[in-house]
Amino acid sequence: MTGRLFRSVRKVFGACGAIALGGAVAVTGTLTGGAALAQQTTVVGETYIPTIWVDPDGCEHWVMDDGWEGYMSPHTNRQGIPVCRRGNVCGVMNSDQLFQTDSANINAGGRKHLVDFFREAGAVSYIITGHTDSRASDEYNMNLSMRRANSVARLAQQSGVSIADVRGYGERMPKASNNTAAGMQQNRRVEIICIR
Amino acid sequence: MKSVKIIAVVCGALALAACDAPKKDKTVDRGIDKKHLSQLKAGVWIDPNGCDHWIIDDGAEGYLSARLDQYGKPVCSGTAPPNTATGAYKSGTFVTDPV
């Protein structure tokens, strides 16, 4: 009697194992290597479905707990841009209010505005990025946005704050359409990212 | 037929009793400190280049992931010297780590 019970318990456990393995081993999917060339292949692997952890900056990470091990990696799109629920941009300076056309010299009003901004912001450090609209050449805009970002960064350092990075993105990261005057004005900007 | 039913019931019970081996649901921590992984608490680790990573010591599991700005570049905040970890990265669990 005991022997029979033991055998049937073993059978039940064995079947459980088989079910668990069956669920884990074969992953069949369609790998599409181009619109015209789709073929069915069988991949040997285990299913690892992540969940999402949101970091203190508001950006998403893939996360998995495998029992004893933990895994994590930033959630970016295929262009390498992180997927974030909110950004760390704490200031957007309208370039028209800081600079003359084609110039990287900050006017008196702009200097005061920026010094006040950095006095109030209170972050650990700042990333300064310059942007332009799409008029003029890409090369010219990359250069102008960099010079303007550097001007803002220099003033920030003079006000005693720490600068983590300075970049010029030219016309490559528009935040509005360049087809309207209002959109172009929004694109002419210096963004300040606050790192806390 | 009856044994199939028994197997199904026992398997279900085993899965519920966290006997999900190999562990298929990777989105939860089934340890003593059970929780969904969205609850993890991070600190900042500064790599040898001076750039920030999110670090989480969750008892048995450790997690590390790059801190990126909205353009996808590493954030190198200068908040601490290279090769240091700061913040409450051990605060998300009551499972102590003897090492």
Image (cartoon, rainbow, N blue to C red):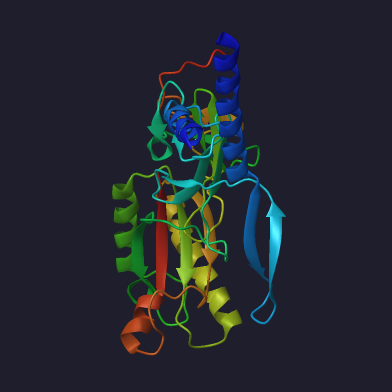
Is B28 placed left or right of A23 in the picture?
Answer: left
Residue at 35% in and 82% down: A183
User: Please, is residue A46 above or below residue A1 in the view?
Assistant: below
Residue at 52% in and 40% down: A64
Q: Residue B29's x, y, as percent? A: 45, 31
Front residue (pair A105, A14)? A14
Front residue (pair B40, A49)? A49
Front residue (pair B53, A54)? A54
Residue at 57% in and 39% down: A19
User: Please, is residue A65 above or below residue A117 in the view?
Assistant: above
Is B7 placed left or right of A25 in the picture?
Answer: left
> Residue lying furthest top in this view?
A2
* Residue A32, quarter of picture: bottom right
Q: Residue B90's x, y, as percent? A: 45, 24
Residue at 48% in and 29% down: B86
Q: Residue B95's x, y, as percent? A: 45, 18
User: Please, is residue A176 above or below residue B55 in the view?
Assistant: below
**Can the viewer see residue B81?**
no
